[in-house]
Image (cartoon, rainbow, N blue to C red):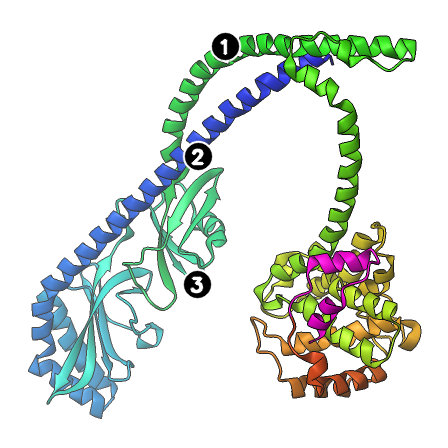
Amino acid sequence: MKYAHRTFLWSIAPFTILLVGIFGAVQQSVSSTVRQGLRNSLRERQAAVASMERRAAARYSRALRAVAESAALKAGLQLVLHDGGKEARLTLEDQLKEICDSIGVDFLLISNGNGVPLAGIMRSGDRISGMDLASIETPTGEYLLHSGHIYRVTPIPVNQAGENIATLSVGERFDLSEFNAPVALLRSGRVIDANLPGFSLRELESGLRRCGRDSECEFSLRNETYLSEVLENVRFGNGYTLRSLQNVDRAVSPVQRVLRRIFVNSGLCALLAAIGLSAVSARSIVQPIAQVVAQLRNSAGSGLPPEFSACASPVREIRELMASFNDAAGAIRDGREELSRAYVEFIGSLASALDARDPYTAGHSVRVSEYSLAIARRLNLAPQQIDEIRIGALLHDIGKIGIADSVLQKPGGLTAEEFALIREHPVIGRKILEGVQGLAPYLAIVELHHENWDGSGYPYGQRGQETPLGARIVHVADAYDAMTSDRPYRRGMRREEALRALIRNAGVQFDPLVVKVFAESLGDEGDLRPRQNVSLANLARAIRGEPVAAAQEASRLS
């Protein structure tokens, strides 16, 4: 493709992308506005329901208080409380039936002070019958579901001599058709009833399963998006919830059709104008560059370097570009060197980036490096080996960058699959680092720091001294810091508890000598006092093999 054509495409493409982006943003804004409108409408309906509930409660309040003070009711109640026989319960049911007829309610249940039902009646059409007390749940909310019907329940205390002896629950039938918007009644995730026409309860239950316990969620029914919210003002208790069902696509689609029509008409006009402007702009950009290309081709044919100073280009930028060609070549060489140094420092900073993914592991790599350094010094290892252990410890968990946050930061126990994924991080870490020149000395620590002394570790199940000493040291330091650090699901151990755990597993999980030396280090405040974080500059110098200043070393160890 010619440069002129590419220039034209690069001129028109951003404008086209901008148009599409603006249209998408407008559509998203409209969709968001409509969704917010649906939420506001739902809240208004909830307020209306709450107002209706308050009016209903006020309407029955005076009559219900009079009922609760009925001497006949209290006498029948006392008979049941003292006798408890069938005849006494039937007598109390007859009194409840009279009350039901007098005040026109659909549900009456009387329970003792402990909430145990004593007697109850309910209306079914024109017939009033007693309840099966074994099948009814004591109302714990403002609504009750019984025998496939919903009742709006008002509890009234029954007092005698200033003491509460029972509770009278009075209820009216409540039908979902009273709502002027679609709703669904659920219990423990199962849809019990709904007033959304054209959908079975099973379909609704399958769609709402995505909502879980969220108050607000979106789900799909027959390729249409619905917005659902829990109606907070309607409290059933006993695991029941009432959810609204709002068709978002149906609310948004009319506005989107208008927007698409406007966008097609105005967008085409703007695109045609942009094509003309882009063609002119491409010609003005390409023409002076074509002159330079022609001169370069001539110089290639002659084998002589081009004389760019002789290019009589009217474009000042082109003249400056050719004049600075040699300077640019030198700058490129310098830039490559700077990039190489920055790349080495960036690899070191990955350890800090890993810790930053989880506030509970912040500083873990640095602490493991400090513990490992203390052990290595007590073992009187060579300075170069000590430095390799220190830096290897900083990078030991670099492979966890390849593990998902949902697994790394899971607050509870891991599944077998998740644990298998975690066990891959040493190998992932080696793959990350092995292609970087200068990091080869640290690969063994990164890859083998989870190998156990008895061969039960991973990834290769190495035994004893088959695992390099540096990896065995980091293994102990890593385990100690993990045990003494707080996690979302547990508090960190005290130092003494963690040390006892290390000693108990010496010779099984850990190198006994390393554990012994580490235990001695814990008693020496000079080795293990809190230190400042190791800077990326020091890490980069160590990776390149450059010496670290003595003052900096003393500061790190102080």
Front residue of 454/328: it is 328
* Label 2 sits on residue: 28
Q: Position of residue 217 (x, y in %)?
A: 43, 50
Specify which label sits upstream in the sequence, 1 or 3. 3
For label 2, the SS is helix
Front residue of 469/378: it is 378
Left or right of 359 on screen, residue 222: left
Residue located 68% across and 15% down the image: 318
Q: Distance between the residues labelled 1 and 3?
A: 59 Å
* Label 3 sits on residue: 188
Q: Are marks 1 and 3 in contact (CB under 8 Å)?
A: no
Front residue of 344/168: it is 344
Front residue of 140/514: it is 514
Q: Position of residue 510 (x, y in %)?
A: 81, 80
User: Magenta stretch: residue 490 in it?
Assistant: no
Q: Are marks 1 and 2 in contact (CB under 8 Å)?
A: no
| Highlighted range, magenta | 532-558
Question: What is the three-letter code of the residue carrying label 3?
Answer: Ser
Above or below, comparing residue 337 to residue 232 in the picture = above
For label 1, the SS is helix
Q: How far apart are marks 3 and 2 (CA)?
A: 34 Å
In the rendered image, which quarter is residue 187 located in? bottom left
* Label 1 sits on residue: 273
For label 3, the SS is loop
Question: What is the three-letter code of the residue carrying label 2?
Answer: Gln
Of marks 3 and 2, the one in the foreground: 2
Q: Distance between the residues labelled 1 and 2?
A: 26 Å
Specify which label sits upstream in the sequence, 1 or 2. 2
Above or below, comparing residue 198 to residue 503 in the picture = above
Specify which label sits upstream in the sequence, 3 or 2. 2
Question: What is the three-letter code of the residue carrying label 1?
Answer: Ala
